Every structure is written in structure tokens, then in C-alpha cells.
Amino acid sequence: MTQIIVLPHAELCPDGAVFEAAPGQSLCEALLKNGIDIEHACEMSCACTTCHVIVREGFAALDPADDLEEDLLDKAWGLEPHSRLSCQTIVQNTPLTVEIPRYSLNMTREH
């Protein structure tokens, strides 16, 4: 199991979170499984940017983003050098610290 640290986010996890995730699953799946309701408007099909995260620690250990993810990331709000789409980020054996940006391009969330 791999430790995932999620930095505090005002709406999704005000106190932050620490949990274990199985290598091989997407970061988005791990977040959702652990009660962090990250947006994923395209149902994790790499067709939007609502699951954008910033990997603050552990970025170098991840497989690189493919061309489709890179193209979509260009449209993400608050893009940084260590930005990834959590639906395309596969958990490895290296611990990760991630930040969920305050906003996404999906200005209206459906519940």
C-alpha cells in the first residue's frame, strides 16, 4: 500500500487527509474510495480537467503524462509544472502528497 497525503481543501477535505492506496489504481479512484469527492465530470475517461490535482511530493516517481492528458492539462485552472489529472495518475509505490486546486473549469457541480 502507498501513503497518500491530501492537503487541506476548504470544501472537499478541510482538515486534509492521509490514507493508504493500492498501487495500480488511479489517484482519482483512491480519492473517491477514501471519501474525498473530487470532481470527475467525464467519469474518469480523460475528457475533461475537473479531477486536476497538483502533486506536491512524489511527482518524479509517476509515469509521465501521455499526449492527451498533456493537451487537456493546458485547459486546467491553476496549472502548475506538477499538475496531473488524477484519473490518469496511477498510484505507484512512492508516497504522494497532492493538492486539489480550489477551482476547476466545471463551474457548476451536479449532485
Image (spheres, helix red, strand yellow):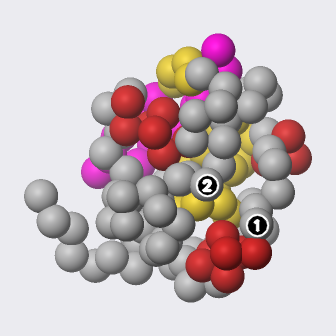
Q: Is residue 46 left or right of residue 56?
A: left
Residue 72, position as x, y percentages in the image? 60, 79
Q: What's the residue at 32%, 32% (across, down)?
A: 35
Residue 60 vertical position relative to residue 40 in the rendered view, above or below: above
Q: Most extreme residue toward the left, as rendered?
A: 111
Residue of label 2 = 88
Q: Nearer the viewer, residue 23 or 17?
A: 23
On whether residue 55 falls in the magenta region, the answer is no
Sequence-first disc among 1 and 2: 1
The kind of residue tagged 2 is: Gln
Residue of label 1: 66
Q: Is residue 77 above or below residue 3?
A: below
Q: What residue is at 45 percent from the left and 57 percent from the top? A: 44
Amino acid type shown at disc 1: Asp
Instruction: Residue 109: give its label.
Output: none
- Residue 79 picture location, percent across and down: 64, 74
**Segment tinted magenta in the rendering:** 1-17
Q: Mark 1, residues whose alpha carbon is within 10 Å: few (<14), some, or many (≥20)?
A: few
Residue at 61%, 54% in the rendered image:
88
Residue at point 60%, 29% (across, down): 4
Going by the image, does 17 lie left or right of 76?
A: left
From the image, give the main secondary structure of the stretch colored magenta: loop
The quarter of the displayed image where residue 32 is located: top left
Quadrant in the picture for the C terminus: bottom left
Q: Give the Cα distance between marks 1 and 2.
A: 9 Å
* Residue 70 quadrant: bottom right
